Amino acid sequence: MTPHPKSVLVLNGPNLNLLGSREPAVYGEQTLAGVETICRDACLAHNFTLDFRQSNHEGLLIDWIHEAGAKQAAGALAGVVFNAGAYTHTSIALHDAIKGAAVHLIELHISNVHAREPFRHHSWLSPVAQGVIAGFGVKGYALAITAIATQ
């Protein structure tokens, strides 16, 4: 099997570096390294390469989205899976970056945000995302990669 020339960028926002230890009843016991393995396996199944990143800093996430838009325009990127964490509910700047970069993006949440606190019910990213996956735990990452593969 020849590797697909395109990659999938998986971005993880603030506090996702704490997966496995932060509120395991909500987010599960899988670590971020385990999530990366799930994503790598899903990418291999769809002949994509994986670019997996995490940052607690909004500006760096914005820079990476801009970079993704350029890679997508050049034909090197299939899409982005973005778990923006709490920035989902607060960041108009991330909304603007996704819209401005015109990147194909799947918004991802490990938990079902609509079954949680009311402040988590609003997303600034949903209006500029191609789709939203929420509530399937870390398995949602593989679902999002499959969604990108079937676009």
Image (cartoon, rainbow, N blue to C red):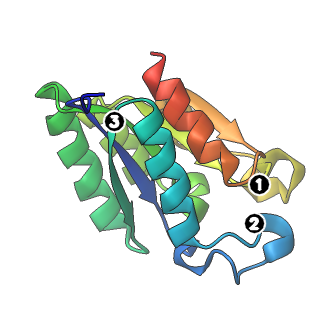
Q: In this view, does 136 lie to the left or right of 31?
A: right
Q: Residue 88: tell me if it is visible.
A: yes
In the rendered image, which quarter contains the N terminus? top left
Crowd class of label 3 (few under 14; some 14 to 19; many from 20; radius 10 Å)? many
Q: Where is residue 7 in the image (x, y as percent from the top left)?
A: 28, 39
- Type of the residue with mark 2: Tyr
Q: What residue is disc 3 on?
A: 48
Q: What residue is disc 2 on?
A: 27
Farthest left residue in view: 74
Q: In this view, does 105 lie to the left or right of 8?
A: right
Please tell me which residue is depicted at 25% across the width and 35% down the height of the picture: 101
| Cα separation between marks 2 and 1 | 6 Å
Q: Which of marks 1 and 3 is in front?
A: 3
Up-down relation of residue 72 to residue 19 (above or below): above
Q: Nearer the viewer, residue 127 or 1?
A: 1
Nearer-N-terminus badge (2/1): 2
